[in-house]
Image (spheres, rainbow, N blue to C red):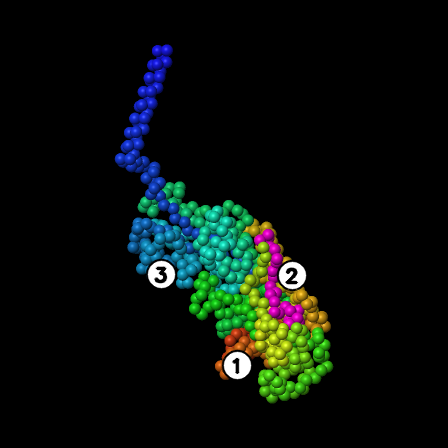
Amino acid sequence: MRLLHVLLAISIAFCVVELRLAWIQLRAGREQPAAPALERSAALQRADNLELDTGRAQFLDRGGAFLTGETVRALAAFPSGGMPRGSEEEIGKLAAILKQDKGKLEAWLNGLRAADVWRGKDGKRAYALTDAQAKEAGQLRLTGVMVLPYRNRYPTSDSLSALHAIGYVSQNPERMKALYGDALSKRKLRLRDSIGGAGLELSLDRWIQGVGRTEAIVVTDAARRPLQGLGLRVQAPDNPHYPLQVKTTIDSRIQQAAQAVMEKHGIRQGAVVVLDAGNADVLAMLSYPAYDPTRIGEKGSDERNHALIAVPPGSVFKTVTLAAALEAGVTNLSERFRCQGHYGRYGLKCWREEGHGVLTLEQAYAESCNVVFAALAERLHPAMLQKTADRLGLGRQIGWHADSFLNGGALRLLPEEEAGTIFKNVEAGKDGGVRTGTGIGQRDVRITPLQAANLAVTLLHEGQVLAPRIVSELRYADGGLLAALPTQASPSAYGTIKAKTASILRHAMRSVVLEGTAEHSLAGEEWPLAGKSGTAELGDSASSHNDHWFVGYGPAEGKARYAVAVLIENQPAGARNRASELFGEIMDRLREPKDKRDASKV
């Protein structure tokens, strides 16, 4: 019993001692802060991040050449925290390497609050160092300055104009929250991350966001010196499937050819669309004014895709009027017409003041006689014009789309595509003045250059409307196929025109070149060509302006290869229509034999 009491007393003594020690430690902690060397070191460490690649999918042309994602050697700089970068002589050497003003470079380095790269003249893209510049800059050993691989989203190359169809990315926090709230909550995305703003960047955004960014992370001590073993490291997603690759149908050679022609003629507003005549794939799509996808809204530029904006087609629409008249049986190829220069009603006149005299139906189309086509339109019920236009792929969206794509909802590849109009409403078309104006492509008629080029493809396919496609497949980074986008039709709810009607229209388009309005500009071409010109009036005043069109295909004998629409917008009234001339030059550049093109790649 005595032993038990002794053991109990010893235990109580130990408890008292432990409580006393705990009290002393607590009091000491309050009176003077503990600062172990390890904790002090951790507190003074800093980590700065620099995004090198967003991880977003890259776009390729049909041959596999990259349209986005230009990787360059960039001069990267991290904040110095007030520590000197190096000597004045070293800063001067760096400025000389970059061929930049020393004061400007020094101000940039000293003003950094977050890691960044030295950018070119546009202030957006990372400046691409040459091999020699990268080597020399790397040898300077300036504090927080290094050479790193950096991916510019949009290349600076002048050989290929900015593709409006690809579009651009931009910061849009509200849209980011609306579409990707779950990813934001899981910190897979950040509010300041860029998302698709237009074109394919917008329509495919859900699938091409990627699985994470590639970042350069620099951990430094208080003197901004990289810590041993923790200095620079590159952190990237460990997934061999990403980033995805989007293979488009764009042919860079054809895009460049069309661009060269437009720039040669100084076209500042308009569009060109080149389609594969066999399947309606978009081989080239140009829009003017041009724009820089890194500088949206810059004065003199326009990020809108004019190839997808519906505007008055002028006499191009006479193709529809002729088809409707033949389908309705209100005329035939043997009918003769007389044009005296005016219609006699509604103030409608022919573009040729003295008139065309007696014309056949085919001659009236080749000469683009307003009087004849006003008469044909007035014979038709407006619903017939409306339905025939629909059968030919006008007045509705025709671009490639899917109701469900990769379990991610509907997909329309070119979301900005406008449907256009024929009449404001069919009831309005019952008025003779409205109907005759519509018959010659004026009044409320609006079509897009994409629809116009596809009209030629439709006639080549005996009236079957195909859906122009601009993306053929999505692939993983390791080459595996994620999704194929097959060619598809775009059928009308009203069926198709007759194959015979399509044949008559093709023959009439050939007559335009051989003996009609395009004879002087196209009859001498080495390729046999066919098409239809159009001049659309945009106003009624003396200072009004016109849009100039030419839509056609070639070769017109044998198997056609290309269908092309050329639109030159906002031209002074009375100016010569140059659209057929540009069409001819584009087709001439595309005439190069396939075997010769293939040989040039070897």
Q: Earlier in the sequence, mark 1 or mark 2?
A: 2
Asked if residue 71 is among those painted magenta in the image, a careful observer would answer no
Q: Earlier in the sequence, mark 2 or mark 3?
A: 3
Identity, as a three-letter code, of the amino acid under mark 2: Gln
**What residue is drawn where x is 32% and y is 57%?**
106
Identity, as a three-letter code, of the amino acid under mark 3: Gln
**Separation of residues labelled 1 and 3 (CA atoms):** 54 Å
* Depicted 519 relative to depicted 75: above or below: below
Label 2 vs label 3, nearer the camera:
2
Regarding mark 1 in the picture, which secondary structure is present there? loop
Numbered circle sitting on residue 540: 1
**What residue is drawn where x is 57% and y is 57%?**
247
* Number of other residues with Cα within 10 Å of mark 3, as a class: few under 14, some 14 to 19, many 20 or more: few
Q: Nearer the viewer, residue 22 or 315?
A: 22
Asked if residue 398 is among those painted magenta in the image, a careful observer would answer yes
Q: Position of residue 291 (x, y in %)?
A: 47, 66
Regarding mark 3 in the picture, which secondary structure is present there? loop
Q: Nearer the viewer, residue 494 or 264?
A: 494
Q: Position of residue 573 (x, y in %)?
A: 52, 81
Left/right of residue 3 with respect to residue 249 in the rendered view = left
Left/right of residue 396 with respect to residue 327 in the rendered view = left
Q: Nearer the viewer, residue 542 or 148?
A: 542
Magenta segment range?
A: 386-408
Q: Which quadrant would residue 525 be assigned to in this image? A: bottom right
Give the residue at mark 3.
100
Q: Which quadrant would residue 277 be assigned to in this image? A: bottom right
**What residue is drawn where x is 30% and y is 52%?**
87
